Image (cartoon, rainbow, N blue to C red):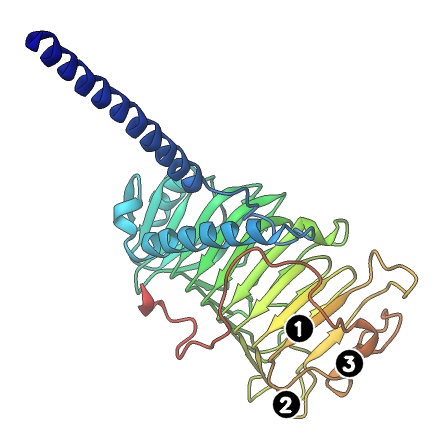
Amino acid sequence: MLILERLSKEFRIKISIVIFLFLALQVLGCNTTSSVASALPSIDNIESIGNIESLNPADEIAKADTKSDSKKIEKSEKTDFHKVAKKVIRISNAEQLFEEVCKAENSLIIECPIDLENRILFLSNGITIIGEEAAVLYNGVVIGEGVENVRLKALTFWGCPLTFSASCKSIDVSYCTFSGDENGIQSSLTILKGLGVEISYCEFIGEDDSQNPLVMLGERNIIASECQVQLHNCTFEGNASFQSKAAMVHLYNCSFSYLEESEENFRFMLAPGTASQYIIENCLFNSGEKPILCYFDVSATSYAGTFSWIYQNKCRPEITDDKCIYDNSDALKSFKHHLSSKKMWQIPYQYTLEMESRVGSSAAF
């Protein structure tokens, strides 16, 4: 009888242990599933600035967290380039550059001035080019046609225009300098069509007699959402600094100045054309009595789909009608009619409105 009671007691204990383990595994499985689900990235179109449809607040919070994490990763990559590059190749002459730049996913370090010898340097998908202190590209043209995931850093373009066209995606140009050469050829940056384009910490220096834009965004035959660019912490000096035809532009933490020699040859700092949409925040315009903005919008108010708009926030000074001039093609000749009281689209990334003490310096690498 005692043996039976003992066996029965042991059996009950074992059954209790089994039930406990079963319940514990259920709880553990539940928690594990929940943590995995919360770690999954939320759906977020980081390539497109023009996502006008709003998500619900919960989606926005998840989206912001995911974006913050991606920014930390990107910052880490920029700071420690050698750890993320698949293949790092040091470039010391033009022939080597032309040979390696056409290979996708290469990471090139330019260590000296490169004469492009009046040739076109075509960028390939996934290419990363970073410059050391003496890295200068001159006497040629650099083109990215329909490319994706291109990163250019700490390069000086001296009389060497840079152009992106044909639906480019994920373009990052940072800490670069664009200036004219001794022959008066201007190093302009042109983005005709592209999504996820970021231009940051760059210097654009225009010649005093130049009437060409230093930055040209969009083209006449596209809609604004096909050219989406964020441009921040950049400095502009000279004439015809910033122009667009059809683009969605987020411009912030930038400074604009006319050259001292350009007392009579000045033109404008900003020039939004038909179908352009500008969100301008925390920008400094050192214009004095000269104009800040020139409109050349050929549409009329009845054509809302192609009408250009500007939203401004914390600019110094604010753009007003007396700071504007108008091209002969402009239909309204009134800044107030182009001014928007709210942002035209929801900006899908986090940013801060603060000026850097030294914009455009490659020393940040």
Inspect the image, locate mark 1, and give the three-letter code of the amino acid beneath it: Gln
Say if 68 sits above or below 285 in the image. Answer: above
Residue in the picture at 57% in, 55% down: 348
Inspect the image, locate mark 3, and give the three-letter code of the amino acid beneath it: Ile
Residue in the picture at 47% in, 76% down: 354
Residue at disc 2, secondary structure: loop
Count of numbered circles in the view: 3
In the rendering, which numbered label is found on residue 150? none
**Where does label 1 land, which residue?**
211
Quarter holding residue 306: bottom right
Residue 337 x %, y %: 84, 74
**Where does label 3 land, which residue?**
325
Inspect the image, locate mark 2, and give the three-letter code of the amino acid beneath it: Glu
Nearest to N terminus: mark 3 or mark 2: 2
Nearest to N terminus: mark 3 or mark 1: 1
**Horizontal placement of 316 versus 62: left or right?**
right
Marks 3 and 2 in Cβ contact (< 8 Å): no
Tell me, yes or no, if residue 141 can be seen here. no
**Horizontal placement of 204 versus 301: left or right?**
left
Residue at disc 3, secondary structure: strand
Q: Label 3, label 1: how many angstroms apart (C-alpha)?
A: 15 Å
Residue at disc 1, secondary structure: loop
**Where does label 2 land, which residue?**
263
Residue in the picture at 76% in, 67% down: 309
